[in-house]
Amino acid sequence: MPSKKSFRAEQTALYFEVSGLTAGVDEAGRGPLAGPVVAAAVILDDLNPIHGLNDSKKLTAKRREALFDEIRARALCCAIAEASVQEIDQFNILQATMLAMKRAVEGLRLPPKLVLVDGNRLPTLSVRAEAIVQGDGLVPAISAASILAKVHRDRLCDAMHQQYPLYGFDQHKGYGTAQHLAALQAHGPADCHRMTFAPVARSVR
């Protein structure tokens, strides 16, 4: 992995090459057994910086919630998109993630000239894009996108809990915890489960 110093040097070169707005993109929810995968795209305002941005996994839930509102209020523009459980089962989780990312970028009110995506895979886009490994901890716009995607998906899981209270989605957010696996064995899968994921497929009666 490149150091932060070398990363900054690489990005400086990119900014010289590409004039215009830069969007950061990240996803949440690739690993869970239920619910959609969510992606967000954010174009930050360099003249109105947001302090405390970081990889969403390194922030408390309370801090993520506060930053979610701040990002929505102060970014130049942002968009949140999903790929459904049905699309995950139809295409596979990687392709569904790329689809959610593509939808997020296309949902931006302002068109970016460059898109920086967390990870090592890129969705198919009509603009230049770069994949940045561990970008959610290095690039503020990707950090902001990771926060939007995580908070949005956590809220979806809270709503899933209201509809399917037997599974405990408000606690594990759809991940394959012992609690979740026990509920699957006891009750079978619900409509919100990803049927192509092995633990869910094994629970079908």
Image (spheres, helix red, strand yellow):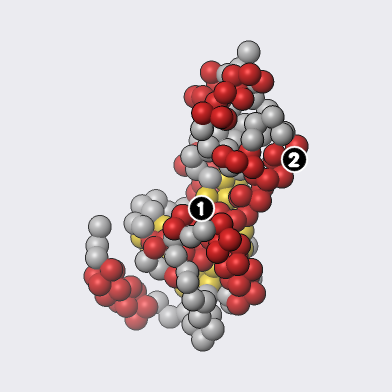
Residue ID at (47%, 72%): 52
Q: Of label 2 and label 1, which has the lower sequence position?
A: 1
Q: Quadrant of the N terminus?
A: bottom left
Q: Residues within 10 Å of mark 1 (few under 14, many from 20)?
A: many
Residue 5 in picture, x, y percent from top left: 25, 72
Q: Is residue 149 above or below residue 46?
A: above
Q: Quadrant of residue 139?
A: bottom left
The amino acid beneath tag 1 is Glu
Q: Tell me the quadrant of the picture where the C terminus can be found.
A: top right
Residue 108 is situated, as x and y percent measured from the top left of the image, at 60, 67
| Furthest residue toward bottom | 47
User: Mark 2 or mark 1: which is in front?
Assistant: 2
| Residue that numbered label 1 is attached to | 27
Picture coordinates of residue 9, whole percent (x, y) = 27, 75
* Closer to us: 9 or 144: 144
- Identify the mark at residue 162; answer none if there is no mark: 2
